Amino acid sequence: MEKTRQRNNKMWILILLPIILLIVSLCLGRYSVSPSVAFSIVLSRIFPIKATWESIQELIILKVRLPRIIIASIVGAGLSVSGTAYQAIFGNPLVSPHVLGVSAGAGFGAALGILLSANMFVVQMMALAFGILAVIITYAISKQKKGSALFMLVLSGVITGAFFTALISLIKYVADPDDKLPEIVYWLMGSLNGVSTKDLIFGIPLIIIGIVIIVVLRWKINILSLSEEEAKSLGIDVNKYRLIIIIVTTIITATSVSLCGIVGWIGLIIPHVGRMIVGNDHKILIPATIFLGAFYMLLIDNVARIATAAEIPLSILTAVIGAPFFAYLLRKTGGRWS
């Protein structure tokens, strides 16, 4: 009973953290807005509140900050929950949603779209399409020879990722160094600077649907985290559910990359932070990582946009934090579950 109460208290704290940071984030930026004004502007979209604020404040809150905050929260939650699911089905605490080449494929699609001077919607669609294509190629390669299914899948993902990374380098090589190359490089490093309300309509529903599916399957993920023989002895179709999770996480990751570029480490470190707080039971861990991921991505984005005059790319900040944490995990676990 005491453990259940403590776990529930932890979950309430995890739920409140991103909500509080979301409210704070509305007020942070080059143009400061008081919490009462920011909150009133948002509520005015729902309730008939008389406007006592300037039009520029409403524009900044509703058109610039709110879409960015929502996308940051959903992308962080999506990448985190995908990483948790991947670490379970692969039985390895050191894998992330990018292991099957989806990020490299999506990055190539976006880089190609920028090189061809496509508009942002086309760039996002190309990123999504090539991200999904990369995982299809990975899955096709893994089925060519008999062997450990998970080992072949990871090895195929490394091959596919390396191939699309080489294609990204080729795109950079032929891109105009004064125009296209800086845009491609900046996009690949990850940023939420250019997101808008249109991105909410395009990408967020896909990520939310993916998160909901993983939440529904979290009991199955508990079983999939066991050895293949144990999972099959419990009457679960391992291959079917593993494929479903791979498809769902691929869509989540590819959509996230299409919205804000390649943001690494979130899907790796947040699941471990979640385990430190609530334990290994995916019935609790999956919801916990959703709120932790949303909080972490919001925190990183706030630092990115207010730390310096020029916005810092997200992947730089996540790597600065993620790389030392990864080294700690590697030293502690040796690549295995602790």
Image (cartoon, rainbow, N blue to C red):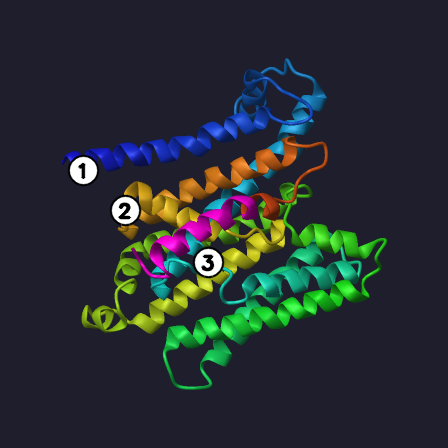
Q: CA distance from mark 2 to mark 1?
A: 11 Å
**Residue for badge 3:** 96
- Please state which amino acid type lies under the numbered disc 2: Gly
Disc 1, SS? helix
Let me know if residue 321 is in the magenta part.
yes
The crowding category of the residue bearing disc 1, from other C-alpha atoms within 10 Å (few below 14, some 14 to 19, many at least 20), is: few
Is residue 85 visible to us here? yes
- Please state which amino acid type lies under the numbered disc 3: Ser
Q: Is residue 140 left or right of residue 29?
A: left
Disc 2, SS? loop
Q: CA distance from mark 3 to mark 2?
A: 19 Å
The correct choice, above or below, for 184 with respect to 162 in the image is: above
| Residue range corresponding to the magenta coloring | 319-338
Mark closer to the chain start, 2 or 1: 1
In the rendered view of the protein, which quadrant contains the C terminus? bottom left
Q: Is residue 39 left or right of residue 94?
A: right
Q: Quadrant of residue 65?
A: top right
Q: Is residue 169 left or right of residue 253?
A: right
Q: Position of residue 167 (x, y in %)?
A: 69, 70
